[in-house]
Image (cartoon, rainbow, N blue to C red):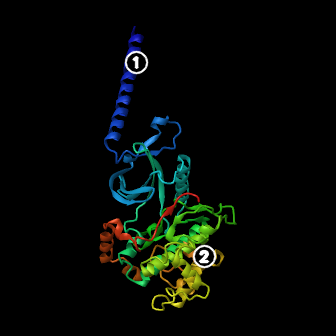
Amino acid sequence: MDHHKKNNKTNTTTSTNKNKKKKNKNEQQKDIKDDKDHAILIPNNNNNNNNNNNNVILDNIYTNVIKSIGVGSYADVRLVQSKTTFQMFAIKTFRKPTKNNITERKFMKQIHSEYCIASSLNHPNVIKTFDLGKDLILNRYFIVMEYCPDGDLCTAISHGLLRSMDELHCYFKQLLQGLVYLHDIMGIAHRDIKPENLLLSGHLLKITDFGVADVMRNAWQTKKRKSHDLCGTTSYVAPELYTQEAYRGDKADMWSVGIVYYVMRRGEMLFASTKLSDPFYRTYLRYHSDQHYALFNNEKLFHSDIRDMLYRLLDPIPSRRYSAQQLLKLPWITKLPVCCQKSKYHDHVNGFSSSSSSSSSLMTRHHKKAMRMALSASSHQKQLFNSTVPNHRYLIKK
């Protein structure tokens, strides 16, 4: 009799616990539906849980979706804050392109490729990537990245915020240091180097957006593989991507570096594309061999060392282009101060130096205020050149 009552009591308790769990689960689902900004889930690596519970609500880690900080051709970026440490993060949420007829499988492959490459990188001049997850309400994947509060190099250029040659060259040298790490240490080609993908955080420049990056070699390999996809942004794409089925990704990056330097100095594009149909590019080819291109031969803008660098970086023959490592060994670049945190990678690539006098002048209070005003400006104000110049990003093969 007592045993029977005990069993009834146990059954009642078990039933009550089940009802509580069911209620908690229903309440949790209701909370998710009520707050779409926070209804984002990240994978949990614990395989012992069932599929329904194999997620952690992002709101347990991050809170306060503060604002949208960028809208791209296939992703949106939002600023969020950690609930425990109050640290800021950037969340990049992907959306499937509609114009390219890309399959779901290939789209997922691109997302995982970007995350796997980006999360493996650790360098002061490369953005840090922390997590990959999925928004279950919007059915969209996202990655969690380091937040850079001072915008991108495109904004700094278009709003005239590069106030000195020291500052300009400080950022340029950091770009080269980041590329030495990517190309020579990690064996990765970025393939979309442009000012919009170079973020600023104080005195640091950081390379971001590895959506079309390619692995040129694995850790145990020495020979670099060639890439095959047509990708990047039209105004920065190297000419061999249009004329060759296979090309060296690192050499293509260095062409883009040459365009970036020119844009930093002049605030405008050199030409719309490197197709022979572009008249400005045809003019450049005509004068490149004897190095008499008028835009480079302005001695007030470019001294002889810089002219030589531009002609070498923007050489139509990829094998003749400078590598990032070779550039950093040029005497005039070696002497440039770099106002960022010293690291073993900067020692490795030669030419790191710290200059407190130059670094203190780079990001003044007035400069930061101007940058904040520039970041709040509408997106059309960021254009570096006439709106008739195409600036299309390719995401799929020819």
Q: CA distance from mark 2 to mark 1?
A: 73 Å
Left or right of 252: which side holds 301? Answer: left
Report the residue marked by disc 1.
11
- The amino acid type, in three-letter code, at marker 2 is Ser
Image quadrant where one finds the C terminus: bottom right
Report helix, strand or loop for mark 2: loop
Does residue 338 lie above or below 29 as drawn? Answer: below
Which mark's residue is nearer the viewer, 2 or 1?
A: 2
Horizontal side, residue 326 vs residue 157: left or right: right
Position of residue 156 measured from the top left corner of the image (x, y, whole percent)? 38, 74
Question: Measured from the top left, where is residue 307 in percent x and y?
Answer: 54, 86
Label 2, residues with CA under 10 Å away: few <14, some 14-19, many ≥20: many
Q: Residue at (57%, 83%) from the top-left corner?
A: 311
Residue named by callout 2: 323
Q: Residues within 10 Å of mark 1 (few under 14, many from 20)?
A: few
> What kind of residue is marked 1?
Asn
* Callout count: 2
The front one of 388 and 73 is 388
Question: Label 1's element?
Answer: helix
